[in-house]
Amino acid sequence: MYPAVEPYAHGLLDVGDGQLVYWETCGNPDGKPAVVLHGGPGSGATAGWRRYFDPDRYRVVLFDQRGCGRSRPHAADPAVDLSVNTTGHLVADIERLRAHLGVDRWLVLGASWGSTLGLAYAQRHPDRVSELVLFSVVTTSRREVTWITRDMGRLFPAEWARFRDGVPADERDGDLVDAYARLLADPDPAVRERAARDWCAWDDTHVRTVPGWRPDPRFDDPEFRMLSARLVTHYWRHAAFLPDGQLLREAGRLAGIPGVLVHGRLDVSSPADIPWQLARSWPDARLDLVESAGHGAGHGIGDKVLAALDGFATRR
């Protein structure tokens, strides 16, 4: 990866609804514009994202999506209203930020949840996207949510049983995402904390498919656990606030936008049929399946992402 760089500008953008979105820019102010869409939802745009880009050739924009990271108000607070935190709101925020920074078109880099958001943004505003680079590709459909929250129990039966048993007995055969969302809104702080801990333990488990896996240290932080659990359940229970299957069904709207999709063959929490179907419907996209990789940037995925970004660096 490229050497660490610091932002040359940053700020809080008022996007309405009482929301302030943190943004920063780094690299070359005259370089090719690019925007980073982090995962989660709720992970925040950490400094490591900056290192995917050649700082001499890119003008990189990072921002923390509503409710997380350095944006305010913070969704870890159970009193924070999530009704103004939807995919539609986030897509509008990206457009406000683009206009605020005077960018005409930009490359979009997204991972995991950020790939869902990137596809939604590009399908809504294809004239504002020069290229798409997406890894650990998901579309957050109801089928994908059910796969993670129920079907993946076949691979991790003991861990899934603990996840299922974290909700009341009469709700264990129903929608587990809805059940956890209700627990996370309980007036009792102890109930909320236990639900966040149980949710994040399962979230950390279902990506554990490659050698060398280690627990995510961010889940040691009670505030991050609550933030992550609240936002993920909020988006998953509504299937990303999109008509189910829209992102695959309307992939033709991406025609003319070059894309690279990088995905791990061992990413069984986000099976490879999703990027495969997307690539079939989007002729300008190339799918790179990394045989030894799971979910995330490890085991060669990061190298493919770097190569894609280097390849697009001089394209205008």
Image: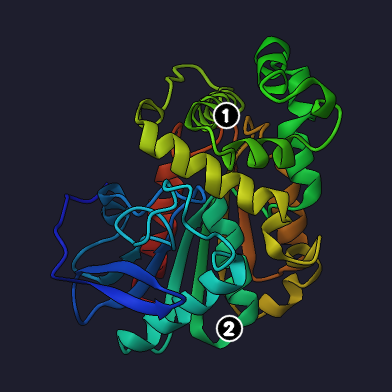
Q: Which mark is residue 125?
A: 2
Q: Position of residue 80 (x, y in %)?
A: 47, 56
150 or 192, nearer to the observer: 192
Q: Which mark is residue 58?
A: none
Tell me if residue 36 comes above or below residue 295 in the rendering.
Answer: below
Residue position marked by numbered label 1 in the rendering: 195
Q: What is the spatial separation of the Cα atoms under label 2 and label 1, in whole angstroms?
A: 37 Å
Q: Residue furthest top?
A: 158
Q: Position of residue 20 (x, y in %)?
A: 34, 70
**Within-10-Å neighbours for mark 1: few <14, some 14–19, many 20+:** many
**Which residue is located at x 55 percent, y 36 percent?**
295
Tell me if residue 254 comes above or below residue 55 in the rendering.
Answer: below
- State which quarter of the image contains the C terminus: bottom left
**Within-10-Å neighbours for mark 2: few <14, some 14–19, many 20+:** some
Q: Residue furthest front?
A: 187
Residue 271 visible from this viewpoint: no
**Which residue is located at x 85 percent, y 34 percent?**
174
Q: Quadrant of residue 59?
A: bottom left
Under tag 2, what secondary structure? Answer: loop
**Which residue is located at x 38 percent, y 54 percent?**
74
How many numbered marks, from 0 up?
Answer: 2
138 or 54, nearer to the observer: 138
207 or 171, nearer to the observer: 171
**Which residue is located at x 66 percent, y 15 percent?**
162
Under tag 1, what secondary structure? Answer: helix
Left or right of 284, for residue 218: left
Looking at the picture, which amino acid does disc 1 mark?
Answer: Ala
286 or 90, nearer to the observer: 90
Looking at the picture, which amino acid does disc 2 mark?
Answer: His
